[in-house]
Image (cartoon, rainbow, N blue to C red):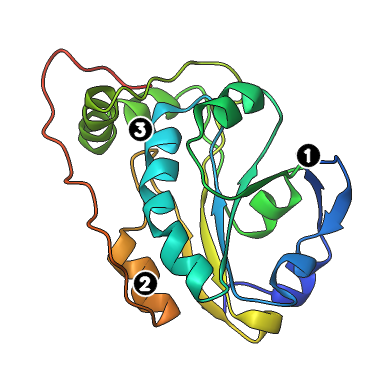
Amino acid sequence: MSEVNLTKLGSNVLKSTVDEESVTIESLWRERAVVLFFLRRFGCQICRWTAAEVSKLEADLKAKDIALIGIGPEETGLKEFKEGGFLKGDIYIDEKKKCYKDLGFKRYNALNVMPAALGKKVRDIASKASAQGIQGNFSGDLLQSGGMLIVAKGGEKVLLYFKQETPGDYVPLEDITKALGISASVEAGERPQCNDDVCTR
C-alpha cells in the first residue's frame, strides 16, 4: 500500500462530468471513504462489464456512506457510457492522465497491446459481457491501462491499490468489501468460459 503517495496524488485535478467543475482528487475522500475505479476507456467492453459488476455494490456502499466513483482518461465514449448506465456512481475525467501516471497504470505500445488484448482473461470477460448484452467499441486511447484505489475517509490510508497487468484484470467484489470491512448482499458474476466465437473489445 505504501506505493501510493496520497499527498502527491491528492493535488491532481479532475473534471466532473456533471457540471464540468474542476476538483482535486483529494476532495473525493475528504468526507468519506471512496472506491475509485480507473477505467481504461469508456468504450472498452471489459471496462463496461467491470463497471456493471462493481455497481452491484452501490446500495451496500451507499448504506455505509462510501462513494463509488469512476474516473476516465478522456471524454471519448463518455456519452455512450453514461447512457448505458454501466456505473452507478459519479464520473470524472483525468484530462492530463496525471492520476494514471502517478498510480503507475501502465501504457501499452503497438507491440504488446494485441497479445494483452487477446489473452484468455479478456476473451472470457468479453464472452460474459456479450452474453449480458454489453458491447464495446475501439474508440479512444487503446493503450492505457487502469485499476482501482480505495481510500479511507480523510485520506487516512489506502485500503486497496490495484493495477491492471492485462486488460482483463479486475478486483473481485469480495476483495472490495473485505478491504472496506463491510458485508454485501450481492453475488459476483461468474467468470465466463471462452469460446472461439468471441474476440476482444
Q: Earlier in the sequence, mark 3 or mark 1?
A: 1
Depth check: give the residue in front, 11 or 51: 51
Query: Is label 3 or label 1 in front?
Result: 1
> In the structure shown, which secondary structural element does the residue marked by tag 1 occupy?
loop
Q: Position of residue 14 (x, y in %)?
A: 79, 50
Please, is residue 154 above or below residue 42 in the view? below
Q: Is residue 72 left or right of residue 194?
A: right
Q: Position of residue 125 (x, y in %)?
A: 26, 35
Q: CA–CA distance between discs 2 and 1?
A: 29 Å
Count up the numbered dots. 3
| Residue for badge 2 | 177
Q: Position of residue 71 (x, y in %)?
A: 63, 47
| Residue for badge 3 | 116
Neighbor class of circle 3 (other Cα within 10 Å; few <14, some 14-19, many 20+) is some
Q: CA–CA distance between discs 3 and 1?
A: 25 Å
- Write the residue at 60% across / 75% down: 33
> In the structure shown, which secondary structural element does the residue marked by tag 3 occupy?
helix
Residue type pointed to by label 1: Glu
Q: Is residue 42 left or right of residue 17?
A: left
Residue type pointed to by label 2: Thr
Residue type pointed to by label 3: Ala
> In the structure shown, which secondary structural element does the residue marked by tag 2 occupy?
helix
Query: Is label 2 or label 1 in front?
Result: 2
Please, is residue 163 above or below residue 120 in the view? below
Q: Earlier in the sequence, mark 2 or mark 1?
A: 1
Q: CA–CA distance between discs 2 and 3?
A: 28 Å
- Write the residue at 57% across / 26% down: 83
Tag 2 near tag 3, CB within 8 Å:
no
| Residue for badge 1 | 95
Q: Position of residue 182 (x, y in %)?
A: 38, 79
